Amino acid sequence: MSKPEAPALTLITKPMPPTVTPERPCWGVYAGRVQNENGAMLKPGVYWHGYRRTKEDDEAEPSDGSERPLRDEWIASPVFVEARTVNSDDDTAGRLLRLVTDRGEREWIMPMEMLGGSGEEIRRALFAMGAEIAPRQRGRLMEYLLDQRPRQTIVTTSRPGWHASGVFVLPHRTIGGDGVRYQSSGRVPNLYASKGELAQWQSLVAARCLGNPVLTMAVGCALAGPLLSKVGVNGGGVHLVGDSSSGKSLAQLIGASVWGDPGVFAASWDMTKGGLEIEAASRNDTLLPLDEITRADARRIQEMAYALANGQGKGTMTREREGRAKLHWRLLTISSGERSLSEHAAIGGNPAHAGAELRMVDVNAGTRTYRAFDDVHGMDGESFHRALTVAAGQHYGHLGQAFVEKLIAGYDRDEMLKDFDKVRAQFQSDSAQAGRVADRFAVIALAGELAIAYGLLPWPTGTSLKDSQLLYREWLERVGSGNAEDRQILAGIASFIERHGSSRFSDVNASEVESRVFDRAGYWEIEPNRRLYLFNKSGLIEAAAGFGLARIVKALEAAGVLAKRDGDKKRHTKNYRLPGGGQARLYVIDPERLENDGGQP
């Protein structure tokens, strides 16, 4: 019996790299290995294709028609110049570079102004992205970049968020179109990273936020950023107030997980005002979480709150003494701390400004059923906190992008404004200042309700609206109605009387001057069932620190606190004969009216 024939061996040969025939002298760039006209193998990279010099070149042109020897100089790893760029922020030019590295392909928009020097900044950036450059060819790489003339031109921006073209720009993608690219201004962390799955975030994080107004508000606050410019609401924020370890930071962490890695996306109050502007601009149209207000400079905290809400940085100069473009942003902020904004400002010796407090509204995140929480879903507070913290650290960065995709797909400005008006009508306000706060809670509610309607939040319809209304009512009950500056003035005077009523005032009807009173703020007058305080001008201005006399008197008149005055209705003072002789016009204040109308700020 014959043996079966052995199977024929099949030789596996690798295909030869393609052959290139450049029109020498010229530049060439190849993503993979190639071979030149003579069959020599060239590794991937940027090349200068030329000829080697020969003795004939030095003496005369070769007469025998022999071919000149080829020369292929490797300059760098593959760097393709794909397109010209124009930055819509400042009209500066650039080039879109595509790099092929050991870590994969990378893109970088190179400002053309970086070619104005030695090129060191460009090489540093390329090295950081994984490019390789021949040590003796670094100058040639700059020549290569300058010589390229790509036909395509694309628009870029260094500002994330909504672009004038209608797309939403993020560092790693553009939502709603491909016509605009993000141009990084430097080596910065990827704020808008994503990890895990949206479905897991919905079931492990969002579902457990249900029943917790502070947590649903944090999610709505994160989603409200893209709506602000659409419905005409200014930026601002909410300030979560509660004792240490009450759960405030968890709310901020959940809000941050809407857009990116909570550990990276969140920021701290511990920075300069210029640093705060950079952090805000990098999160334009999204959210800025700021942890622990105790780390902030108490002397500048209110100024920083104004800047965040107003959305415009301070103008600066370049080294050439030219004006540098101001940073701009529009967003909502979630701040946290054990003290309110005004209490922290007072530590630095600054009087509280109602405008700053309105821009960063206090929210109770410390005395709810479970401190910052109202429902821990069958767990104890510590287990609830840990479960959400772990889940938000494993699944993040999906909801914000998905929300913007839905907005763009179904966006209709008129319908959006109608929806906002319907929601806003359910937040009653009796003053322009309360109306500003109501606007903020209304846009937070609208964002949450839209996300519910889009199927992005596993909450019943009306959840975000109900919870936002609850927090808004709590704020109204805490601060009272009417003008915030009026309340602040009246509260300041009431506090001044409480602190100095026995040391800086004395009986106006005494026969002699009270020698124990130093730095006199005024007098008192005893009447049946009440004591009136008679302030001199300097004492009144000191008591209502931060306000001018005319504004103080306006608040006193509005509250009916001035108990007496002379017959002339234009006067706000009453003339008194003073102990020891002499007369003075004094502001007569009834402290009971201060307590009834001023309350506590």
Image (cartoon, rainbow, N blue to C red):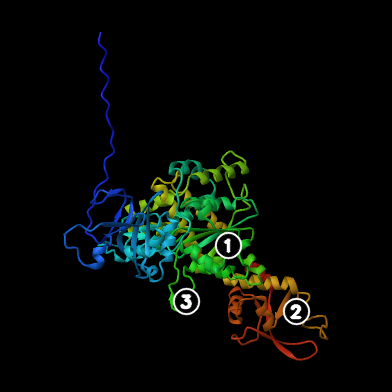
Q: Amino acid at mark 1?
A: Trp
Of circles 3 and 1, which is in front? 3
Q: Position of residue 68 (x, y in %)?
A: 23, 58
In the rendered structure, which disc, 1 or 2, sits on the residue that comes first in sequence? 1
Tell me whether circle 1 and circle 2 mark residues in contact (CB < 8 Å).
no
* Above/below status of 264 relative to 358: above
In the rendered structure, which disc, 2 or 3, sits on the residue that comes first in sequence? 3
Q: Position of residue 114 (x, y in %)?
A: 39, 68
The local secondary structure at tag 2 comes to strand
Q: Amino acid at mark 2?
A: Glu
Task: Check disc 3 and report the residue beneath it.
Answer: 319
* Above/below status of 587 relative to 79: below
Q: Quadrant of the C terminus?
A: bottom right
Q: Position of residue 308 (x, y in %)?
A: 51, 66
Res. 584 in view: yes
Q: Nearer the viewer, residue 552 or 119?
A: 119
| Residue in the image at 79% along x and 87% along y | 579
Marks 2 and 3 sit apart, C-alpha to C-alpha, by 63 Å
Task: Check disc 1 and report the residue beneath it.
Answer: 269
Q: Quadrant of the N terminus?
A: top left
For label 1, count other residues whose C-alpha is less than 10 Å away and answer few (under 14), some (14-19) or many (20+).
Answer: many
* Above/below status of 315 relative to 537: above
| Residue in the image at 55% along x and 62% along y | 361
Tell me whether circle 3 and circle 1 mark residues in contact (CB < 8 Å).
no
Task: Check disc 2 and report the residue beneath it.
Answer: 525
Of circles 1 and 2, which is in front? 1
Q: Position of residue 370 (x, y in %)?
A: 62, 47
Disc number placed over residue 55 in the picture, else none:
none
The local secondary structure at tag 1 comes to loop
| Residue in the image at 67% along x and 68% along y | 347
